[in-house]
Image (tube, grey):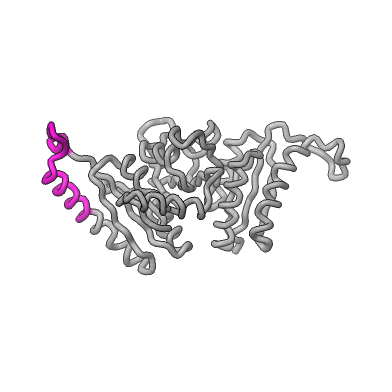
């Protein structure tokens, strides 16, 4: 049986190198093959004995070669596939997704208060891929995540926690693919899984002086019972993964953005077969992509 692959889209940016490093760690953890892919529509067909000074693909080769050198220093024994594709980036990455466990892309930061941006390639791949797509910020590292958690803890932020995987779930419909990905990610890292559910308050909870505490408590208690019940079979399936169940009386997007300090990975879902004809990224995934600082996995589910 051939080992599974983890594909990385390279474009020569600092962010794509960060994505390659993260994907190499993941591939090493899973004993998978790292697939370093650069797509260039102008890739030329050349003979094997083409001299370097006439190599029209020298720039494209250098992008992949630099990524190989970057990950080899950390994982000298890792299996690596170098792939140059004469194609537009989106179709090349979607084809790679079809035969890989996941696709990993870089995401560029603007400023601390503006969040992050994602190019058209990233949006198209996330919206159309049928496998998980992981986004990695150029500045992210496990040390940075730990420092962020310490900062939030010093501020007395009650929502912060230590190293873990966070998954944001709804309770209206099954999301087995998302939960399987999240539990597996936590198990492979040996860290807890925080299952987060945001439950917006009803209109009558809002009063002129703020929020009616009794209504908020009732809504939260009901949601906690539903979440406990939904997670019962998953506890049996993954008995070695410590669970942290968190219910917040606010929108899922706000709940997620305020609960990820110190996380190693955040997983959010995207409906694979949405009623709208065009690919759609929901509000929770949209918020995670723009405002969560650690790697974000967008997992499609039926």
Residue 179 picture location, percent across and down? 38, 54
Q: Residue at x 38, y 69 (%)?
A: 240
Nearest the eye: 197 or 15: 15
Q: Main secondary structure of the magenta part?
A: helix
Residue at the farthest front position: 154
Q: How many marks?
A: 0
Residue 13 picture location, percent across and down? 63, 39
- Drawn side of residue 205 relative to residue 174, left or right: left
Examine the structure image and report whether residue 219 is included in the region drawn in magenta: yes
Q: Is residue 170 above or below residue 202?
A: below
Q: Give, as a single range, the part of the protein colored magenta.
A: 202-226
Q: Residue at x 70, y 45 (%)?
A: 64
Residue 223 picture location, percent across and down? 21, 50
Viewport quadrant of the N terminus: bottom right
Residue 31 picture location, percent across and down? 58, 63
Examine the structure image and report whether residue 232 is included in the region drawn in magenta: no
């Amino acid at each position: 049986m051939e080992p599974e692959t983890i594909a990385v889209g390279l474009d020569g940016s600092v962010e794509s190198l960060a994505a390659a490093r993260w994907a190499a760690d993941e591939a090493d953890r899973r004993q998978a093959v790292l697939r370093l892919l650069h797509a260039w529509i102008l890739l030329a067909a050349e003979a094997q004995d083409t001299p370097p000074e006439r190599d029209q693909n020298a720039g494209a080769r250098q992008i992949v070669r630099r990524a190989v050198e970057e990950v080899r220093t950390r994982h000298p024994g890792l299996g690596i596939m170098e792939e140059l594709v004469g194609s537009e980036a989106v179709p090349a990455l979607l084809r790679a997704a079809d035969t890989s466990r996941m696709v990993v892309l870089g995401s560029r930061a603007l400023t601390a208060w503006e969040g992050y941006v994602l190019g058209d390639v990233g949006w198209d791949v996330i919206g159309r891929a049928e496998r998980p797509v992981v986004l990695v910020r150029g500045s992210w590292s496990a040390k940075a995540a730990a420092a962020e958690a310490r900062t939030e803890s010093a501020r007395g932020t009650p929502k912060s926690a230590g190293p873990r995987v966070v998954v944001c779930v709804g309770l209206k419909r099954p999301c087995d693919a998302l939960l399987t990905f999240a539990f597996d990610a936590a198990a492979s890292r040996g860290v807890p899984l925080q299952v987060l559910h945001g439950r917006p308050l009803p209109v009558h909870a809002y009063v002129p002086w703020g929020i009616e505490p009794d209504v908020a408590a009732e809504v939260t208690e009901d949601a906690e019972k539903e979440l406990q019940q939904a997670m019962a079979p998953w506890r049996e399936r993954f008995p070695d993964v410590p669970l942290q169940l968190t219910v917040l009386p606010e929108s899922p997007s706000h709940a997620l953005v305020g609960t990820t300090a110190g996380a190693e990975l955040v997983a959010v879902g995207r409906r694979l077969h949405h009623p709208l004809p065009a690919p759609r990224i929901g509000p929770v995934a949209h918020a995670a992509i723009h405002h969560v600082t650690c790697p974000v996995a967008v997992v499609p589910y039926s």
